[in-house]
Amino acid sequence: MPDSPAEPPSTGPIDAEILDRIATHLARSARFDDVRVRPSYAPNAVVADYDLGYFPGGITRAYLRIRWFETDDFSIHYSEQYRTRDSWECRWDRHPNDHNTREHFHPPPDTPTLGEDSDYPVEWRKVLATVLTRLDNRIEAFWET
């Protein structure tokens, strides 16, 4: 059934080929302890758990969950889980919606519904490089204080 005029167009089906490429790319990085392609709890995503040696002791898990669609829409969600407080999260998105432009960033600490309009490169490798650079800067900041 086609999208109704009242609803934004859908992102389309997951791009399994791109997800496989993303997983292969992330698995080559020392940043990640574990990279899973479409695990049973997230069958439409790649989930990459960071090596916790990059983080201070209070963080119990840090991960990326990446969904990529055949329309080149995407969602890249980053989360840090803490022992003593709520999680810290942010998300990079490209998808039709009614709350921002198609390309937007949901800022930390808790990825609210409304995001900040943004521009992303077209190619998945460049999008991923942009995200990883921003996260590398966050991780480095833990050790600068």
Image (cartoon, rainbow, N blue to C red):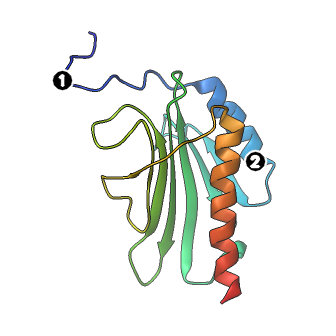
Compared across the picture, whether 59 is left or right of 41 comes to: right
Query: In the visual, does 90 lie left or right of 36?
Result: left
Q: Earlier in the sequence, mark 1 or mark 2?
A: 1
Comparing 123 with 88, the one in front is 123
Tell me what residue is drawn at x 55 percent, y 37 percent. 38
Numbered marks: total: 2
Q: Are marks 1 and 2 in contact (CB under 8 Å)?
A: no
Residue identified by numbered label 1: 6
Give how far apart the Cα atoms at labels 1 and 2 are. 41 Å
Q: Would you say residue 50 is visible in this rendering?
A: no
Question: Neighbour class for label 2 at 10 Å: few (<14), some, many (≥20)?
Answer: some
Q: Which residue is mark 2?
A: 27
Which amino acid type corresponds to the residue marked 2 in the rendered image? Ala
Point out residue 66 in the picture as x, y percentages from the top left corner: 55, 43
Q: Residue furthest left?
A: 6
Q: Secondary structure at mark 1?
A: loop
Amino acid residing under circle 1: Ala
Q: Please state if 97 lies on the left or on the right of 61 as rendered.
A: left
- In the depicted structure, whether residue 78 falls above or below residue 47: below
* Image position, residue 15 (x, y; %): 56, 24
Q: Is residue 145 above or below residue 91?
A: below
Image quadrant in which you'd find residue 46 = top right
- Residue at 66% x, 72% y: name it: 139
Outermost residue toward the top in this view = 1
Categorize mark 1 by other alpha carbons within 10 Å: few (<14), some (14-19), many (20+).
Answer: few
Which one is in front, 38 or 106? 106
Residue shown at the point (43%, 84%) measured from the top left: 84
The C terminus sits in image quarter: bottom right
Q: Percent x, y for residue 21?
A: 71, 33
80 in relation to 1, above or below: below
Q: Percent from the top left, x then y, of residue 107?
A: 44, 61
